[in-house]
Image: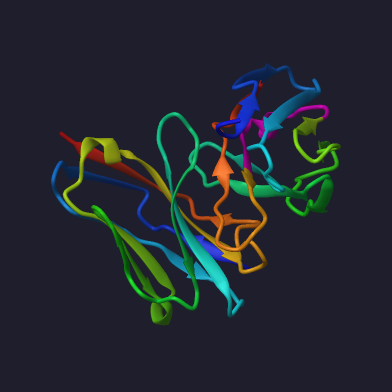
Amino acid sequence: AQKVTQAQTEISVVEKEDVTLDCVYETRDTTYYLFWYKQPPSGELVFLIRRNSFDEQNEISGRYSWNFQKSTSSFNFTITASQVVDSAVYFCALSEATLGGNEKLTFGTGTRLTIIP
Amino acid sequence: GAGVSQSPRYKVAKRGQDVALRCDPISGHVSLFWYQQALGQGPEFLTYFQNEAQLDKSGLPSDRFFAERPEGSVSTLKIQRTQQEDSAVYLCASSAYAADTEAFFGQGTRLTVV
């Protein structure tokens, strides 16, 4: 069975600090996808990134970066120079790599990030 | 449409009442998913459609839950004889069925059973 663990329930940092959100996953599949989603107070889940299990290259997108390490089954997310608009609940998720790669996501319990002005 | 639309946004039901939740996916999206998100938890998979075919309903918690997508576009999630434990946000997502595509989520329907 697949499982995603986000051990950090809540994190608060002062604006402009860097913050890392941890994600550890379990799967028996050799091919899978990993995701991060942002859930602002409005409720919808906003897609941030998808990673194929064969691609361990780290990714950077503006102030966001992701560190995928298969050896430790982790897919951590770092926000650099945090801003108040980054305040939200962040979810890590995992899916089997079927065609399309996004069926039946297994989500973690989320990390509530609060950026203090 | 521009995004995934769900209605109603909020629903209060008396225990035992039947409810129907609607999802309008992005036009042309083949895949449609329903998730249930309890308070303080991550979303949990309920069911998946590819066009009008319900390919996976393994996440539906009981036979009181029923989903349909008769014409391969709009979907309805129906819950019969609602119970308090059904209180949650129900999220719908759609995607184009192809490699390297993302699922777009709606804002959800918050169901409160009293």
The C terminus of chain B sits in image quarter? top right
Residue lying at the far front in this picture: please name it.
B28
Closer to the camera in the image, B41 or A47 = A47
Q: Which residues are magenta?
A: B80-93
Q: Quadrant of residue B7?
A: top right
* Residue under the image location 60 percent in, 20 percent down: B10
Q: Position of residue B52 (x, y in %)?
A: 83, 45
Q: Is residue B14 above or below residue A84?
A: above
Q: Position of residue B76 (x, y in %)?
A: 77, 32
Q: Is residue A68 above or below residue B75?
A: below
Closer to the camera in the image, B113 or A50 = A50
* Residue under the image location 81 percent in, 23 percent down: B18
Q: Position of residue B105 (x, y in %)?
A: 56, 40
* Residue under the image location 79 percent in, 47 percent down: B51
Q: Position of residue B66 (x, y in %)?
A: 83, 38
Q: Is residue A41 above or below residue B9?
A: below
The N terminus of chain B sits in image quarter? top right
Horizontal arrangement in the rendering, residue A33 relative to residue B59 (left or right)? left
Horizontal arrangement in the rendering, residue A14 relative to residue B22 (left or right)? left
Horizontal arrangement in the rendering, residue B38 relative to residue B114 (left or right)? left
Q: Is residue B4 above or below residue A104?
A: above
Closer to the camera in the image, B20 or A111 = B20
Instruction: Count the marks.
Output: 0
Q: Quadrant of residue A32?
A: bottom right
* Residue under the image location 77 percent in, 54 percent down: B58
Q: How is the image coloured?
A: rainbow
Does the stretch in magenta take in B87? yes
